[in-house]
Structure formats: structure tokens, C-alpha cells
Image (tube, rainbow, N blue to C red):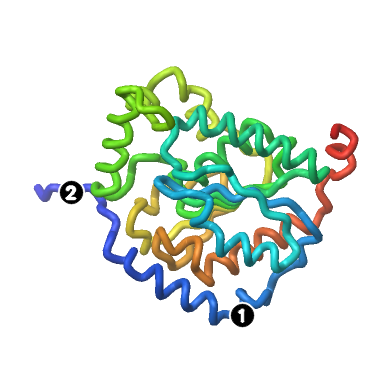
Amino acid sequence: MAVRLPFIPPIWRESLAGVEAAALLRSSIWRGAGMVWGNDRPVLLIPGFLAGDGSLRTMAHWLRANGYRTHRAGIRINVDCSAEACTRLEERLERFAHQTGQPVTIIGQSRGGTFARALAARRPELVAGIVTLGAPTVSQLRIHPLVLVNVGLVGALGSVRVPGMLRWSCLRGECCREFRANLIGDVEVPYTALYSRTDGIVDWRSCLDPAADLIEVRASHLGMGLNAEVYAEIAHALARLAAPEPGVSDLAQAA
């Protein structure tokens, strides 16, 4: 009987992220083709594991150029305990929603997408919709072994009380129980999950959340934030969210 080896993402494809970025800047979507004008609608951007807010700077620039009001997650490097990170993000989300007087669209890349899903399940009244980019919401550890080593190193440092880092206990411990529940809980807001079979870091099957509208793109994992096809799908998702006007008045009154 043949032994079935575990799927290992083709990490060599991550070298194509720069090519994807160059193609984006030459594309019509970068110049606003197919975009619905944002009318100052708020968008919170959450970066992936080991990344910070700067990794989504290009996307933020594109969104602002098309009339959206973007807000950073306040993350320098995404390595903290999921529960603690989501608590800070929830506070940031609440302030942003009340400041703008309307629910917020959340776009999260990779681990940032798992945070977006958790926030949407926990605080749907603050969220207009979410878009996840290569986010392993179904199984967080179905990633390339080389990246898994980095998760292990961060977990080891956090377990010996280095501040600001996740701990091994986060995987099954009490601290992240609510976060894990939110990853399998109902999502009441529009939810678009983008995944790529050419993702070199995350096993694409771990992105197939049954609660989401699943859309396949051709992109590397790192390139998800720099890929013209991804941007086109984000534009479509934002257009769908813009069709019915969000409940501005309710949040404005609450503010």
C-alpha cells in the first residue's frame, strides 16, 4: 500500500511575489477599474503572521485612492497570543466603527484573516463584512514545515514568558478558547474567502471555510496583498457590500 505523504505547499512560488507586485502596478484594477467609489466607508486591514501593518501599505494606498477610509490594525509583528491580539483589535474596531458612524469592512491576510473571522463572529454589529486572503481558518497549522518551525520558535519564546508572543498553551489552552470557538461559530455578515492552489505557505484546503463565499485566485501567499486578481476580487466584494447601504444611523446614534 502506498504511503500518502502530507501535502506540503510549494514554497518556491513565494519568490514570485515581486512579479505579482509589478503586474499589479501595470493593471487597470490598480487605476481603479471595476471599483465602486468608497464614499469614505471604513476598512480595517489586518496583516499576517510575522508581518506588520506595513505589509498591507500598498493595499491601503489603493483603497484610499478609491474613496475608502482605511485603518491599521496597530500590529508591528503578528506573533501575539490570538486572544490578546483579538481583544486589542476588537477595541480598535469598536472605536473605528463609532468614529465613522458605520460598520467596518475587515480585510485580513493569512493569520489576520483568522482574526477577521473571529471578530465578525464576536461583534457582527460592528462589521459590514470580511474578506480573508489565504487565511487558514479551518486548520491554522496546515502550513509549510519551514513556517511551522517559526511558529514553534515563537511559541517556545512565549512559553518562557517573553512578552508579546503566543504560547504553546494557546493551541489548546483556556486563553484562546473563545477565539477557537469563534473560528467555527456562525458568521452573520458577508464573508468572502480567497484561496490559491499556488499558495506556497498555507495549504489551500485549510482556507475552505464552509461559512464563506469561496473564491479561487492564482497568487502566492505573500503576493495576496500585491496581486491584481486578488485586488479585483476585493473590488467585487466591496461592490457587493456597497449595494445595500450599511446601518449608518444606528451606529451614529450609539456614538
Left or right of 245 in this view: 217: left
Residue 52 percent across, percent down from the top left: 48, 49
Q: How many marks?
A: 2
**Residue in the image at 39% along x and 54% along y:** 204
Q: Residue furthest top?
A: 174
User: Residue flagged by tag 2: what amino acid is it?
Assistant: Arg
Q: Which residue is mark 1?
A: 28
Residue 199 percent across, percent down from the top left: 37, 59
Q: Indicate the secondary structure of the residue bearing disc 1.
A: loop
Judge depth for marks 2 and 1 and give the one in front.
1
Left or right of 76 in this view: 60: right
Left or right of 209 in this view: 31: right
Q: Earlier in the sequence, mark 2 or mark 1?
A: 2
- Residue in front for this viewpoint, 82 or 60: 60
Quarter of the image with the C terminus in it: top right
**Residue in the image at 76% along x and 54% along y:** 41
Asked whether the residues under the numbered discs 2 and 1 touch, taking CB atoms below 8 Å apart as contact, a structural biologist would say no
- Residue in front for this viewpoint, 211 or 198: 198
Q: CA distance from mark 2 to mark 1?
A: 43 Å
Q: Indicate the secondary structure of the residue bearing disc 2.
A: loop
Q: Which residue is mark 2?
A: 4
- Residue in front for this viewpoint, 245 or 23: 23
Disc 2: CA contacts within 10 A as few (<14), some (14-19) or many (>=20): few
Residue 91 percent across, percent down from the top left: 66, 32
What label does residue 3 carry, if any?
none
**Residue in the image at 49% along x and 68% along y:** 227
Disc 1: CA contacts within 10 A as few (<14), some (14-19) or many (>=20): few
Residue 110 percent across, percent down from the top left: 46, 49
